[in-house]
Structure formats: C-alpha cells, structure tokens
Image (spheres, grey):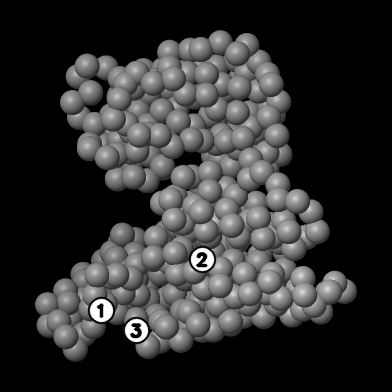
Amino acid sequence: MTAFAAIGVLMVLAALAIVLVPLLRAHSSGARRWPAALIACASLPVLAGLLYFAWSNWHWDGEPPTEGTSPAIAKMLASLEAKLEANPTDVNGWLLLGRSYFQLNRFVEAADAYQQAYTLTQGKDVEAVLGLGEAWTFADKRMLMSRSAELFERAVELAPHHPKALWYSGLVAYQAQRFDVARRRWAALVALDPPAEVKRALETKIAEIDAAQGGSPRSTEPPVIAASVVKVRVGITPDLAGKVPPGAPLFVMVRSGEAGAPPLAVTRRASDRFPQLIELTDRDAMIEGRGISSATQVTVVARVARTGDPRAQSGDLEGQVGYDVGTGETVDLTINSIVP
C-alpha cells in the first residue's frame, strides 16, 4: 500500500505542476488566477482517485494480498509458475500470473509475466499490452512518459474503446501537455458511460481543458450530420431471451467493411428489455473524424456481453444486420446467435 500511495501522490503532484505553473504565470490578474488554481488543486486528486477506484486491480475492500499473509496465495503462485514452466506458451497463464503479481505489489515480476504474454501474442493482445504498460508504470513512474506511453498508445490502436487504454493514454497526453489528445481520449471514455461519479469527474476535467485553452467549454460529442444516422430496433429470439445474464450490457456497434478496423460508432445500453429502438450518429464515433458519415453501407452488430467486455467473448448473444447510411429508416435487428 505504501508504494501504491507514493506513486499515486507523485503522479498527482506532477499533474498539478503541469497545470499550475503555466496558469500562475499567465498574464492575467492574480485575483482571477487563484480561483482557477484552487479548483485545479481540488479536482485533480479527486479525479485520480475516482478513476483508479473504477478501473484498477486494487482490492478496495481491504489490503491487497501479500505472500506473507496468505500461504494459499503463495501455493497458488507456485502452482501457476510450475504449470508455466511446463507449458511456457500458455498466454492466459502468463496474464493470470501478471495480474497476481500486480495485486501483490510485485510490479517488476508482474512486468516480466506480462512481457511473456506480450511476446507470445506479438503485441496484439490488448490485456498483455495494458498489463505490461501498467506494471512498468508502477515499477518506475518515469516509464509513464516513455516505454509505458508507447504501450498505452498501442492499446488504443488495438481497442479504441477500452476504458483503461483511454484513461492511461489520456493521462500521458495530459502530462505531455497534448491537451487536445487528452480531451479526445477522455471524451471517448465519457461516451462509454462509466460510473456516474467518474463520468462527472471526466466531464469536469474536459471543461477545465477547454477553459485553459482560452475557449468556452465544448461539447464532449462531435457535431452530427443529419443524414448520418443509423436506426435499429433491437429484438431477441424467444429461445435466447431467457439466456440474457442479469445486468449484462448491450453493445450496439456500427462496422464498416474494413477487416479488423474499429467500429465507426458504438453505444452501450441495458439489456433488461427487448425490443428497444436505438439510434447511432457521429456522436457515437470512437475516433474523431471517422464516424458513420464516412461510410454508405455498414453492418450493425448488437451483442449482449456476458462478461461485460465489448469485444466478442464465447457465450455472448449476438445478431447483426446490414444498413444503408443516409436512408434514415428503422431496420429490425434480431439477436439470434451465441458466439462460439
């Protein structure tokens, strides 16, 4: 816990320095500078705490497990290490070992485990990429602006809608004073509808970036072109309706014909009722400038995510339908299959 707190405090202090130094040096009256400085001092630590509370691996209900307090964990680690020694190509095993070491605050060993998974997947597994970047950052805070920064950018390329990728890459951009990039990443994070308190904190931070750049706060959503709308009525077959897990989110994505390309737009909804009418526009774009208006024919995919992950997982319930952008018509989309 001590190492975690120290790193957290140092990261918050660094962010405060980046904001306050130029703010207090600005050529405006001191009476107007100090309220903004006080707001920054108050909001940055709160934002950092809220975001890490939402997406970290930390055991918030108590102290993280350590080798000295739990023989069962030490036995589990020894067993997992033995299995990996016998089967060193087990990617999931290395990921599990990395997560276990990270929760034990053994960040260097966590990085070594994630490095194995990263190498085996040739840097194409987002969990390995993020795990390695996060472990490096906690092992040495200087890594955030160097080796880890590259990994977080790589994670955004692999999974543009991954909350942790958007948060970390936005933080890197913010500390590098690339405020436009930080704003885009955090606005995309807001679009994923995180917990209410995190969403409010992010929106406040985005508004502060707008104000610091000398303009009035902008919307976190890009402008909409009237014809660039996709309307679907999402339903589900009777035989699958009873298989919807309680609380599982419904992701609706608009995809172009490009193989492996990220969705043009995505929205997250509750899966507690069907059918439901859903509209997607350029406001739901994951990458600025690459939205629904950039295509004419798309495929709309609706997926009930069993594990909460927007990426397809075995057991998820899914359906899709083609759509002609520009017609404005409502098309029926039926969830009628299970991801193998």
| Image disc number at residue 63 | 1
| Image disc number at residue 1 | 3
Q: Position of residue 66 (x, y in %)?
A: 23, 83
As shown in the figure, which amino acid type bears the numbered disc 2?
Leu
Q: Quadrant of residue 21?
A: bottom right
Q: Which residue is mark 2?
A: 47
Q: Secondary structure at mark 3?
A: loop
Mark pair 1, 2: CA separation? 22 Å
* Residue at x 40% of width, y 61% of height: 55
Image quadrant occupied by the N terminus: bottom left
Classify residue 254 as left or right of residue 327: left
Q: Quadrant of residue 175?
A: bottom right
As shown in the figure, which amino acid type bears the numbered disc 3?
Met
Q: Secondary structure at mark 1?
A: loop
Q: Earlier in the sequence, mark 1 or mark 2?
A: 2
Q: Position of residue 148 (x, y in %)?
A: 56, 71
Q: Position of residue 91 (x, y in %)?
A: 34, 61
In this rendering, the answer to whether 17 lies above or below 304 is below
Image quadrant occupied by the C terminus: top left
Mark pair 1, 3: CA separation? 7 Å
| Image disc number at residue 167 | none
Residue 25 visible to an observer of this rendering: yes
* Residue at x 60% of width, y 49% of height: 187
Dot in front, 3 or 2: 2
Q: Residues within 10 Å of mark 2 (few under 14, many from 20)?
A: many
Q: Earlier in the sequence, mark 3 or mark 2?
A: 3
Classify residue 98 as left or right of residue 131: left
* Residue at x 46% of width, y 45% of height: 193
- Whether the residues at callouts 1 and 3 have beta carbons within 8 Å, the answer is yes
In this rendering, the answer to whether 301 lies above or below 127 is above
